[in-house]
Amino acid sequence: MTTDQPDKLYYRGCQKIEIGGEELFPEGFESRILMSSLNVAPRERFFDLGEVLPGDLSVKIRYEDKDHSKAIFAQGYSVSVILLLEESL
């Protein structure tokens, strides 16, 4: 996950992520654990989720923004989720 305002994602964000109907990150999983930035080496920016079984590979993300005194909402912010899918040959 990445954002245009890291403090807001770090303090305010949490989510639930499912791929192909399988819950990978449960409701309320803190965004700070999934954040990536330029301070992280490229080879360390991704979670290896192992093999995902073939299927529809639908992706469902429920993002939640919660109030936090260290990151006032004000003008909002954008959040991006980057998925890298590799095909086995």
Image: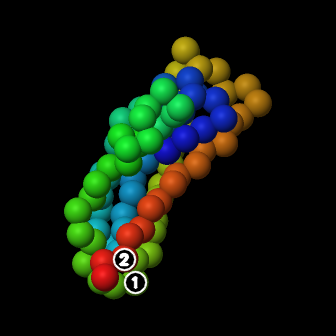
Q: Residue furthest front?
A: 89
Residue 9: horizontal and vertical position, in percent?
A: 53, 33
Identify the residue position indicated by label 1 in the image.
56
Picture residue at 51% right of the left edge, 54% below the top: 82
Q: Residue furthest right?
A: 75
- Which tag, 2 or 1, sits closer to the chain's start? 1
Above or below for 23 versus 47: below
Picture residue at 31% right of the left edge, 82% below the top: 89
Picture residue at 42% right of the left edge, 68% below the top: 85
For mark 1, does the 10 Å Cα neighbourhood hold few (<14), some (14 to 19), or many (20 or more) residues? few
Disc 2 residue type (three-letter): Glu
Residue at disc 1, secondary structure: loop
Residue 16 visible in image = yes
| Closer to us: 74 or 81 | 81
User: Is 45 displayed left or right of 13 in the figure?
Assistant: left
Residue 72: horizontal and vertical position, in percent?
A: 64, 21
Q: In which quarter of the image is residue 52?
A: bottom left
Above or below for 34 versus 82: above
Identify the residue position indicated by label 2 in the image.
87
CA separation, marks 2 and 1? 14 Å
Residue 13: horizontal and vertical position, in percent?
A: 49, 36
Residue 84: horizontal and vertical position, in percent?
A: 44, 62
Picture residue at 58% right of the left edge, 49% below the top: 80
| Closer to us: 73 or 1 | 1
